[in-house]
Structure formats: structure tokens, C-alpha cells
């Protein structure tokens, strides 16, 4: 959804924006801010973790609980209930389910099991992204929201072809929303890597990229067996490699189908009006 002028965008009776970029660059912060200004906040990761992967997550909790005799007996007698308390700001249930590959004694998953869960996430993410038009209409019809923001995960770029206007997800998003790339700097990337190491977020790798980086990590660290890989070590190293691989593809998606704002400029936005002004500036910049 591209505009002939900034004025055309500003005068539209309803606004629907899909924000994308690096995990942790400010997408959810922006969406939370706009929510206070009567924008409907659609979190793709929340939708994945509830509608499309909720049962997988809870079953995993139960499988772990069943290893404890005391809890196993209570579960079998329906005396306790185990559920996921996932929220927009807390995606730990999804992160814990996806896990990290490597030594199972250090909390890792066998590579094949990790790949199986990655495929579940890929299917779920595509479905959650294609739900955006439905939620735009629901937001207006049920709750009276004229403005809508889709807060995507960093892995949006992994499940689309950023050069294909007819890619199913790209076609859905561009037909119903304006794509906005929140672009960070190398300094931002270094800070995101540090934060990821302290508090991992859900990660999705393209299958071929995962295998290549898995083998590269083993070679660099002189590890032969998959079971000998340190899951924390690979998680942090893999995130950094994935981050730098995604950056040019985010940029290409924005050049093809949307607009770009700098993360530093977005950080100064205090309300919905200032966000619309920033969007207008991005539209003018593209036209120039």
C-alpha cells in the first residue's frame, strides 16, 4: 500500500501499518505506545503462541511436569492445570518451546527435534501474518478501532520472498497495510546481540541457513558430535549471524513495497500524531 503523497496517507480515514525489522528494534514498544492512542495492536508472535502453537507449548510443559512423580499423579487425576501465560511483552513460553539445539544435558534439543519445531513455527508465522486483514476488520467492527498496527517478529523476512509481489504473505500485507521498516544501526545490532544473550527471544532460521551455520559453528569450535554443541553458545552466535543476514533483506523489502524510518527517530515518538508525522516524512523521503 504505497501513496502518491504524504497528504494522501494523512487524510485517509483509517490507517493500517505493518512494522518490521530486527528483533528488539522497537516494534513492540511502538505498538504499545499506539495502543494507548486508540490503535489496535496485533502481535504476530502472540498470535503464533496462542492460536497456532499454543497446544504445542502447553503439551511441552506437561511433558516436563510428567517427569516429576508428584506432578504426574496430580495431572493424571486432573487435580492441577498447566497453561501458558504468554503476553505481548512476555514471549518466554514460545521461546522455551522453540529452544536451542545442542547438548541435552545443558538444556538443548536434538537437532532433528529443533528442526521439527522450527517447521511448526514457519507454518504458524505464515498463518498469523495472513490473519492480518481479518483482524483489521475485527478491530473496526467489534471494537471501533480505525487505526491498526501489525507488530511482526524479526523472522517475517524468513517466510516471504521479498522480491515477489505475488508472494502470498507479501500480497496479503501490501493489499491491506502499509509496510514500514524500522532500521537500526550497527550500534543497535551490537546492543540487540547483548540483550539476546541475556534474554533470548523466539528465533526462526531458514532450514538451509540453519544447517549451514550449525556445521560452521561445529567446525569453528572443533566439535564433531551434534550432542557436544553448547546450546547457549550456538544460540548467541547463531543470532548474530542471522541478524546480519537479515538486514539487507529487510532493506530490500522496504525498497520494493514500503517505507523506512530510523530506529533513533522512532524512539522520539510520544503519541499517535507524532507517529503519523514520522510516517508522512518517510513517504516524502521515498517520493524524493
Image (tube, rainbow, N blue to C red):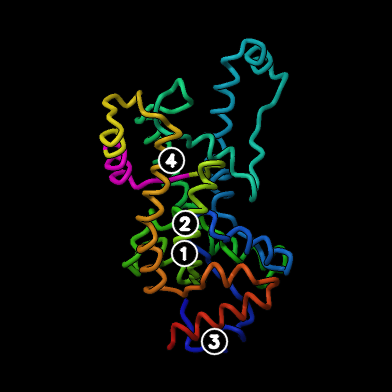
Report if the CB atoms under discs 1 and 2 are less than 8 Å apart: yes
Is residue 211 a member of the stretch shown in magenta?
Answer: yes
Instruction: Give coordinates of residue 139: x percent, y percent.
Output: 66, 64
Which badge, 1 or 4, comes first in the chain's sequence?
Answer: 4
Judge from the rendering whether residue 39 lies leftward or rightward of residue 121; answer left or right. right
> Would you place residue 76 above or below residue 11 in this image?
above
Q: CA distance from mark 2 to mark 4?
A: 27 Å
Q: Which residue is mark 1?
A: 185
Question: Which range of residues does the magenta coloring cover?
Answer: 203-215
The crowding category of the residue bearing disc 4, from other C-alpha atoms within 10 Å (few below 14, some 14 to 19, many at least 20), is some
Q: Which residue is mark 2?
A: 189
Which badge, 2 or 3, comes first in the chain's sequence?
Answer: 3
The crowding category of the residue bearing disc 3, from other C-alpha atoms within 10 Å (few below 14, some 14 to 19, many at least 20), is some
Q: Nearer the viewer, residue 136 or 249?
A: 249
Instruction: Give coordinates of residue 229: x percent, y percent.
Output: 36, 28
Judged by depth in the image, the label closer to the viewer, 4 or 3, is 3
- Secondary structure mostly seen in magenta is helix
Q: Which residue is mark 4?
A: 120
Report if the CB atoms under discs 4 and 3 are less than 8 Å apart: no
SS assignment at label 3: helix
Instruction: Give coordinates of residue 174: x percent, y percent.
Output: 45, 70
Which badge, 1 or 3, comes first in the chain's sequence?
Answer: 3
Judged by depth in the image, the label closer to the viewer, 1 or 4, is 1
For the point 40% across and 24% down, which residue is it? 103
Amino acid at each position: 500500500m504505497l501513496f502518491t503523497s504524504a497528504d494522501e496517507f494523512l487524510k485517509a480515514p483509517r490507517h493500517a501499518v505493518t512494522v518490521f525489522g530486527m528483533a528488539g528494534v522497537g516494534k513492540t514498544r511502538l505498538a504499545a505506545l499506539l495502543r494507548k492512542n486508540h490503535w489496535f495492536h496485533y502481535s504476530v508472535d502472540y498470535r503464533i503462541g496462542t492460536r497456532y502453537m499454543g497446544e504445542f507449548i502447553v503439551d511441552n510443559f506437561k511433558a516436563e511436569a510428567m517427569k516429576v512423580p508428584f506432578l504426574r499423579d496430580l495431572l493424571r487425576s486432573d487435580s492441577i492445570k498447566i497453561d501458558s501465560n504468554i503476553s505481548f511483552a512476555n514471549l518466554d513460553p514460545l521461546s522455551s518451546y522453540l529452544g536451542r539445539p545442542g547438548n541435552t544435558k545443558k538444556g538443548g534439543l536434538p537437532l532433528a527435534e529443533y528442526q521439527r519445531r522450527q517447521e511448526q513455527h514457519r507454518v504458524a508465522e505464515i498463518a498469523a501474518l495472513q490473519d492480518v486483514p481479518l483482524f483489521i476488520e475485527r478491530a473496526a467492527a467489534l471494537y471501533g478501532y480505525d487505526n491498526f498496527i501489525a507488530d511482526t517478529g524479526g523472522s517475517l523476512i524468513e517466510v516471504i520472498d521479498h522480491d515477489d509481489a505475488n508472494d502470498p504473505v507479501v500480497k496479503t500485507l501490501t493489499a491491506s497495510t502499509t509496510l514500514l521498516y524500522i532500521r537500526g544501526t550497527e550500534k543497535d545490532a551490537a546492543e540487540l546481540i547483548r540483550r539476546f544473550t541475556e534474554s533470548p527471544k523466539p528465533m526462526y532460521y531458514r532450514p538451509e541457513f540453519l544447517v549451514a551455520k550449525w556445521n560452521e559453528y561445529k567446525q569453528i569450535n572443533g566439535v564433531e558430535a551434534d550432542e557436544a554443541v553448547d546450546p547457549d553458545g550456538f544460540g548467541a552466535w547463531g543470532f548474530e549471524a542471522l541478524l546480519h543476514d537479515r538486514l539487507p533483506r529487510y532493506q530490500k523489502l522496504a525498497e520494493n513495497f514500503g517505507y523506512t524510518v530510523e530506529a533513533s527517530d522512532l524512539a522520539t515518538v510520544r503519541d499517535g500524531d507524532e507517529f503519523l508525522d514520522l510516517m508522512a516524512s518517510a513517504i516524502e523521503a521515498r517520493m524524493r
